[in-house]
Structures are given as C-alpha cells and as structure tokens.
Amino acid sequence: MMDKIIFIALSFIFMTTLSHGQEDYKEIVNENKQYTADHQYDVPDLKDIKLKRKPKNVILMIGDGMGHNQVFAAYTANGGKLNLQNCTHMGLVKTKPAKKFTTDSAAAGTALACGKKTSNGAVGVDADSNKLVNIREELELMGKATGVVSTSSITHATPASFVAHQNKRNMYEAIANDFAESNIDVFIGGGKKHFVDRKDSVNLLNKLEAKGYQVLEDINEIAEVTEGKLVGLTSWEHNKSVLDGRGEKLSKASKTAMTILDGDKDGFFLMIEGSQIDWAGHQNNTSYLVTEMLDFDKAIGEVLAFAAQDRETLVIITADHETGGFGIKDGSYSEGKVEGMFPTKGHTGIFVPLFAYGPGAEEFNGILDNTDIPNLIAELFGTQLNDETK
Ligand code: MG
Ligand code: MG
Ligand code: ZN
C-alpha cells in the first residue's frame, strides 16, 4: 500500500516537472520588495517632429505583464523620465479573454494579433479552434516585410500568437514548425531547442537555411546583419533576465529587425516583446520587474528614435495583461528607489496602458478592447482582419 502511494507521488512529481518546461519561471520563489537604481539614463524629446500623414510601417511593442504601476516603477527608478513619455497618445485596454475574467498570454496575444477573443491557452485560433489570420499575416499579404522579436523563447505564447496557429500554447514543437512554414522575414528570440531537439527529429534550422534564411545565435553577429531573411536564436530556451546578464539583447535585436525590414519598399510590421516583466510579477520580485521594465523602455527608445527619423512609422506600446497586482508603497526619484508590493502571484484583469506615436496614433485614444488594436491597424491600411464576408 505504502509503496503504491510513494510510487504515485513520485510519478506525479516526475510528470509535473516534465510538463512545466517553458513555464519554470512561475515556480521560482525569489521575493524582493525594493529596487534601487545604480544609474539613470536621459531621454530625448521627440514630440515636435513633423510626421507624415499616413503610416507605412507599424511596430507593436508588448510588455508582457506591464500594468500602469510597472510603468510608474520604471519612471521612478529612472528619476522621473522614460522614453515612453515621447508617445503623444494614450489609451486604456481591457484584456478579458473569452469565457473568463482574467487572461493568459496566449488568449491576450491572440486578441492583439488576430482581433478576436479566444480561450486561455489558445494561440492564433478562436474558442472553437478555427484558425485566425493575424495582423502580421494580413500586412504580409499587402507586400510588407514582417518580423517578431522577444526576450523569451520565440515559441512562447506572445510571439507565437503573431505566427502560429495551435490549440495549446505548450505545443512548442508544432509552434516552431509554424515559424518554419511561415513567410516571416525576421525572428529573433530564444528557444533554439524547439527547432533542433524535436520528437520528429527534423532540424528546422536546416529547413530555414534552405529557404534562404541566415541563421545566427550570437547577438553581436545578429547586430551586424542589415539585409536578407534572418533567424536569430540567442539561447537554447528562454533568454536570461537582465539581472542574470542578458545585456542589451532586446535593443540590439530590435534595431537589427528595424534595419532589415525597412529595406522593403512596401513597409513593414514588427512585433517586439519585453517578455519577462510578467515573470518578475509572478515571482513578486521588484528588482527583476524594474530592470526588465527599464530594458523594455530602452528598446522603446530605439524604436521611437527610428520612428522620429522615418516619420511614417506608427508605434503602439501596450501590454497583454497586468501581473502581480503590483503596487508601490514608497520610492525616491533622486535615488531611483521603488518599494513594491504584490497581492497575487498571478495575472489580474485590470486595464493595461497603451501608448502610441506616429501617423495614426490618434486612433488609439480612450478605452479600447485588446481586439480593437489589430482591427484598427488593419483599418488604417484599408483592410479587415478575419472578415467572414470575404
Ligand atoms: Mg515587399
Ligand atoms: Mg509573453
Ligand atoms: Zn504570466
């Protein structure tokens, strides 16, 4: 009897360990309540740039788990300034998925990519498992170059929502296959494992090379690329956190993607994710949260500098949901100090902020639903996403 119980208990532990895989970040308990900046950076003023009337390019930036207080924490830590403040328009975004109150990153990513509500866990398909067209694919059909960049594995829920169509977010190998089958021009993130260490023994990187992609792993080599199709897989699974030494990967990958995609005369669509703001929320770790937020804001600085120079790039910066119910008890602008608090280790259903810059930014004001975002982008380019009448 006892043997049997021990056996069942051990199998349970074994199975749950195996099944977690890419979700390990939710298990680590590393609470930390206070962050103090070791340096603060300046931000340029881009608000008076004379922009063109219509957008040619769109860059959608998603801070996973980035609520208002996450933004405010970074703003405080950096002495009362952020690159984000160059955005000229703001909105509040409702994140509710189909059926439930609180979303996961898959349903929210699908809403932001495809303009339809779906069930938690679904990637690029609706609540009845029907395949949805995403805004990246729709703009690709109009001739635009497209890309995705992420600090997680590229097969994780948020970037996957802009490329893949699978019923479950943890179908990483199927999602990697969707990347290899797609016509995307650039993708840079972690997750090499899901392309080469697969149950079907297929090496998707060989397949991608045969399709004409440059395949690179070193971020400094990636940063040198200026044209052609590019796969950048900068880690075996997820990229490290900033605290563990990720460095400037997100800013460098974002710059490379913009440079390559800007070579297309028809314009481009690029999604950039700051993935680990969410994981810091799950771990209730204020230092992790603020450093990931500041890293995301530095990438925002690169994107807005490009948009200000280009003058026909619409930039939308938002979140898929808030994580941790993060609050701020005290802080100091001069010392870059933030004292945080977290009532939950999970996601919340509250509004997330939206910031916009560039031609078309004025469309993204007020209270929006997450599904409005890709639908409004499609409308700006005279098309309609998932139009049943077509
Ligand atoms: Mg083209
Ligand atoms: Mg994510
Ligand atoms: Zn999460």
Image: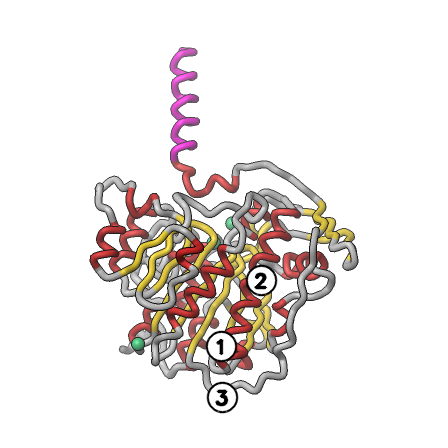
Quadrant location, ligand no. 1 = bottom left
| On screen, residue 374 above or below 246 | below
Total numbered labels? 3
Tell me the chief SS of the magenta region: helix
Q: Please tell me how crowded label 3 is: few (under 14), some (14-19), or many (20+) other residues with Cα within 10 Å.
A: few
Q: CA distance from mark 1 to mark 3?
A: 11 Å
Amino acid type at image mark 2: Lys
- Between disc 1 and disc 3, whose residue precedes? 3
Q: In the rendering, which numbered label is found on residue 201?
A: none
> Is 330 inside the magenta-drawn segment?
no
Identify the element where label 1 is drawn.
strand
The residue drawn where x is 35% and y is 53% is 216
Amino acid type at image mark 3: Arg
Which residue position holds label 1?
314
| On screen, residue 157 above or below 376 | above
CB under 8 Å between callouts 3 and 2?
no
Q: Is residue 83 left or right of residue 108?
A: right
Q: CA distance from mark 1 to mark 2?
A: 18 Å
Task: Give the mark toward the camera: 3 or 2.
Answer: 2
Q: Is residue 191 left or right of residue 329?
A: left
Which residue position holds label 2?
298
Which residue position holds label 3?
53
Nearest the viewer among 187 and 285 is: 187
